[in-house]
Amino acid sequence: MAGTKQLLIDIGGDLYLMPGMPTIASWDDKTRPQNPKAGTFGFNTQTNNLEYFDGSDWYGGSMAAA
C-alpha cells in the first residue's frame, strides 16, 4: 500500500509497539531506557542477554543456543 504510514504505540521509556506484531524491545548499554517502569524487559544487543527491570535494578540472563 503506497503512502501508508506505520502506526506505533508509545509504551513509555522510549519503547514503542506496532499493533498486531509481537516484538521485544532491544537496546545496548548506552541506549537502555533511562526511566523504565518496573516490569520492562528487552534484549541487550551488546551483551546478547535478555534484561528485566524490577523497579530498582536491571537483571540479565544469557541466551542459550538451541
Image (spheres, helix red, strand yellow):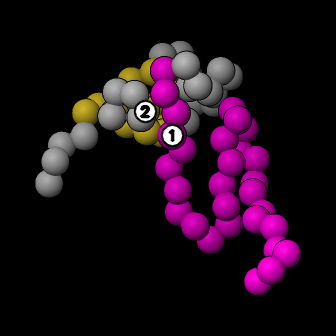
Q: Amino acid at mark 1?
A: Ser
Q: Where, quadrant-wise, is the C terminus in this rendering?
A: bottom left
> Which residue, as the protein is rendered here, is positioned at the far right?
3
Residue bearing mark 2: 44
Q: Secondary structure at mark 1?
A: strand
Q: Is residue 56 above or below residue 8?
A: above
Q: Crowding at label 1, few (<14), some or many (≥20) Cα neighbours within 10 Å?
A: some
Find residue 18 and report its image quarter. bottom right
* Residue at 56% from the left image edge and 25% from the top image edge: 32
Left/right placement of residue 60 relative to residue 41 reads left
Question: Magenta part of the protein: which range?
Answer: 1-29
Q: Amino acid at mark 2?
A: Asn
* Residue at 34% from the left image edge and 27% from the top image edge: 47
Q: In the rendering, at what x and y percent does residue 23 appear?
A: 52, 56
* Residue at 76% from the left image edge and 47% from the top image edge: 10
> Which residue, as the protein is rendered here, is positioned at the far bottom?
1
Q: Where, quadrant-wise, is the N terminus in this rendering?
A: bottom right
Please indicate, yes or no, whether residue 39 appears anywhere in the rendered image.
no
Tell which of 46 and 40 is nearer to you: 46
Left/right placement of residue 46 relative to residue 31 reads left
Majority secondary structure of the magenta segment? Answer: loop
Q: Are marks 2 and 1 in contact (CB under 8 Å)?
A: yes
Count of labels shown? 2
Q: Is residue 22 magenta?
A: yes
Q: Is residue 7 above or below residue 3?
A: above
* Residue at 53% from the left image edge and 63% from the top image edge: 22
Q: Is residue 44 magenta?
A: no
Q: Secondary structure at mark 2?
A: strand
Q: Is residue 6 above or below residue 29?
A: below
Find residue 20 and report its image quarter. bottom right
Residue 26 — which label? 1
Q: Crowding at label 2, few (<14), some or many (≥20) Cα neighbours within 10 Å?
A: some
